[in-house]
Image (cartoon, rainbow, N blue to C red):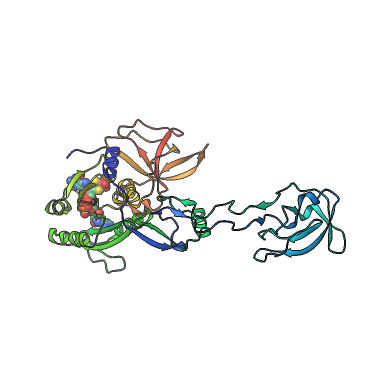
Amino acid sequence: MSLLPVEDAHARVLAGAEPIARTETVSLRAARGRVLAEDILARRTQPGFAASAMDGYAVRADDAARGAVLQVVGEAAAGHGWTGSIATGEALRIFTGAPLPEGADSVLIQEDAEPAGDDRIRVSEAPSRGDHIRRAGVDFSEGDRLLSAGTVLSAGAIALAASGGHPALTVRARPRIAILATGDELVMPGETVGPHQIVASNTFGIAALAEEAGGEAIQCGIAGDDVAEIAARFDEAVAEGADVFVTIGGASVGKHDLVGKVFASRDVDLDFWKVAMRPGKPFMAGRKGSLRIAGLPGNPASSLVAATLFLAPLIRRLAGFPDRPLYHDGVFAEAMPENGARANFVRAVFEGFEGTRPRLRPLGKQDSSLLSVYARADALLMRPVDAPPAKVGDPCRYVALD
Ligand SMILES: Nc1nc2c(c(=O)[nH]1)N[C@H]1C(S)=C(S)[C@@H](COP(=O)(O)OP(=O)(O)OC[C@H]3O[C@@H](n4cnc5c(N)ncnc54)[C@H](O)[C@@H]3O)O[C@H]1N2
Ligand code: MOO
């Protein structure tokens, strides 16, 4: 198979990917960042009564000309309305959020009134009719559509749903992302690392990335370099209702690279294998019915870069989030040599700004095994296929690492 350009691989991974249909109901406190599965209609009117927007006096505008003296007949505060009616020549002491009493049509702010003795005030600045009143339903009325299906629940959206009388919301279920590490050399973090063994670090990095993208990560542990074992884990993940099955390692051409064989044995429709990029070349993508398959390379930076470019956008789609642009604009903080036949995703740090664009400085060592470098990176500076040498200050494009 020839190497697929990055843009084509990205488009093919996303082709036909729709938000999954399952939903769940979550409390408002658990709703942040989730995707609404249905329209939200107001169960109440807000405010349910005409209310004062300021601290002052509820008055009748006709009585409240400059210099007029009014009798204060009572007091209303938020949560404590006053039940009488304001007659000509009267005013009610009122505070922000308190219901406007009958008879009054305006609020005179207290800065525009002065004491005139014996519970009376003098108007120093006349209000206009309707001043500082929040009419009933000015925010929304019962039955109004407050939020539409597909909305990503922000702080404001959650507050609005709460105000509309909803203690819980129906949201799209998170896509289930099954993650299997492969390799005889792998042990879990904290376990004794024997001779020639390493820790399965990628599993945890990819699980974190899957959850950042809106998925629910299901750890399938480690399978040895054994077709039957990897196949058994694949079958388990399918039985558990995974939406995406992700493997780490075993994706290249070595004799222990068995993932492709397992997919073939399970009638996975392999879409492509190998992308014209560095790191992350041996990435494979496929489908089996509605199940999506992503085979990530074993090298840590390779697997994280491939997952950032392809797996995260796929998960976002399945979760119902809007697509995001992959690249942002920056400038080179350091000259770089020409690039070859694979797009190069250079681990880089931000170093101030040139106008609104961040300056990117490539990190020194770029070997795809180096997690110590990857973890420091703010971004992947993208060097296109066959790019000419770049000078300091030249424009570049980058992928942000959140
Ligand atoms: N002759 C060739 N050799 C290789 C090629 C090639 O085109 N021709 N491609 C190279 C590239 S590029 C990469 S990337 C790697 C990827 O290979 P695999 O996906 O088959 O990965 P493994 O061989 O299983 O492992 C590679 C490396 O990564 C370590 N690893 C594996 N899983 C994990 C994990 N979960 N956590 C941390 N580290 C892991 C593994 O121990 C190896 O050191 O192939 C090149 N070879
Ligand atoms: O491209 Mo591999 O993905 O260099 O390490």
The residue lying at 76 percent from left, 53 percent from top is 60
Q: Is residue 179 visible?
A: yes
Query: Which of 12/337 is in front?
Result: 12
Res. 224 in view: no
Spot occupied by residue 214 in the image (x, y as percentages of width and height): 37, 54
Q: Position of residue 300 (x, y in %)?
A: 30, 53
Count of number-bearing discs: 0
Residue 172 or 61: which is nearer the viewer? 61
Q: Residue at x 49, y 57 (%)?
A: 161
Compared to residue 344, the image places residue 39 above or below, namely below
Judging depth in this view, the residue of 368 and 108 nearest the camera is: 108
**Where is 159 relative to 346, above or below?**
below
| Depth order, front residue of 186/290 | 290
**From the image, which quarter does the N terminus lie in?**
top left
| Image position of 55 with respect to 277: above or below | below
Looking at the image, the residue that sits furthest to the right is 117
Which residue is found at the position 27% from the left and 44% from the top? 16
**Image-based side of 372 in relation to 103, left or right:** left
- Residue 220 at what x, y percent from top left? 25, 62
In the picture, residue 186 is in which quadrant? bottom left
Location of residue 384 by image quarter: top left
- Residue 211 is situated, as x and y percent measured from the top left of the image, at 36, 57
